[in-house]
Amino acid sequence: MTANSYETGRLNLPFTGIASFGKFPIVTDWAALDAHAVILGAPFDGGTQYRPGARFGPRALREASTLFSFGHAGAYDHEDDAVYLGPGVRIVDAGDADIIHTDTAQSHANIRAGVEAILGAGGLPVTIGGDHSVNIPCIEAYEGRAPFHIVQIDAHLDFVDVRHGVTRGHGNPMRRAAEKSWVTGLTQIGIRNVSSTARDGYDAARAMGSDILSVRQMRALGPAATAARVPAAAPLYLTIDIDAFCPSIAPGTGTPSHGGFLYYEVLELLQILARDHEIVGIDLVEVAPDYDPGGVTAILAAQLLLNLLGFIFHARGL
């Protein structure tokens, strides 16, 4: 699926110019946002417990996304017989939230401010991380807004309450989300093998409204039956950790876990969810490009996001 390039009067080939996400226009004045979807970088990895490097994820995703920006008027998918991300869809790149090294609280506050600005402008926030802790301020930005359900695609449950005094690391986001009155429940998909959460965390997750599925359980059900487990017609926030995918296709992450998803398994699930639900927010996290010399992890993440955006706006008639 190809991102639609803005008109510059130039060829604007993928390897030229500034690598904004999808080569969409750059709007760093958050008071002047006017788009259907807004990309926000959250290059924070201070919540990482093992291998750092996801702070470089937003930069890698932006560069990888230029592969899909050839200036076509939308992307024609012959399997669906549909054009996605046509000229009627306005997407902009708002740059990055300001990150202060070693200061989780202020960095998270700055990420929240970016998401709040996007929501205030009526856009769909699409946050690219960064480690999974950046989901915490993203969800906090919806305080006072309509309730929604979270669909998490991840290798790890991320439901730790507190560990070593840490409550806002990349093992905590789903626990923090479940505590919010505006989060009605969680569907956690892809959870497998050695998790970051102990058994009592799984018990707490289920008690707080989580439906937990492993990769093998989703494969047995298939994408349609898996999507059917999500509460019907509920607005959805989608949080996607790249380690949900098998490290054979996504090695560039800090906590790889074998036995993960392949591309079309996740894509087909997302297409159904985008068709049947209002998507109110997205984050994609944990791309750590230095662990992937070939850059295929960032390409996978960029392609997945562009396709997902295409599905969302096609469902809205755009």
Image (cartoon, rainbow, N blue to C red):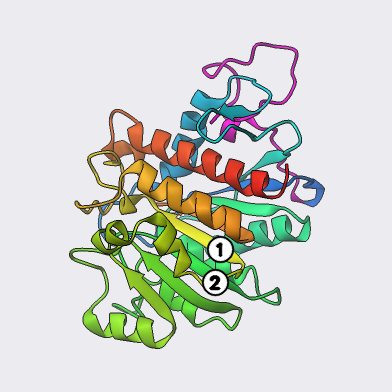
Residue 149 got which mark? 2
Is residue 82 visible from the viewing direction of this image? yes
Magenta span dominant secondary structure: loop
Is residue 169 visible from the viewing direction of this image? no
What range is drawn magenta here?
A: 1-30
* Residue at the image position 26 percent from the left and 54 percent from the top: 255
Amino acid at dot 2: His
Q: Taking 316 as reference, is 71 above or below it?
A: above
**Label 2 environment density (alpha carbons within 10 Å; few <14, some 14–19, many ≥20):** many
Q: Taking 2 as reference, is 11 above or below it?
A: above
Give the left or right position of residue 193, taking residue 21 as reference: left
Tags 2 and 1 touching, CB below 8 Å: yes
Mark 2: which secondary structure? Answer: strand
* Residue at the image position 60 percent from the left and 25 percent from the top: 18
Give the left or right position of residue 88, taking residue 257 as reference: right
Q: Taking 226 as reference, is 306 above or below it?
A: above
Q: Quadrant of the C terminus?
A: top right
The one nearer the camera, 15 or 123, is 123
Amino acid at dot 1: Tyr
Where is residue 177? Give x, y as percent. 49, 75
Residue 237 got which mark? 1
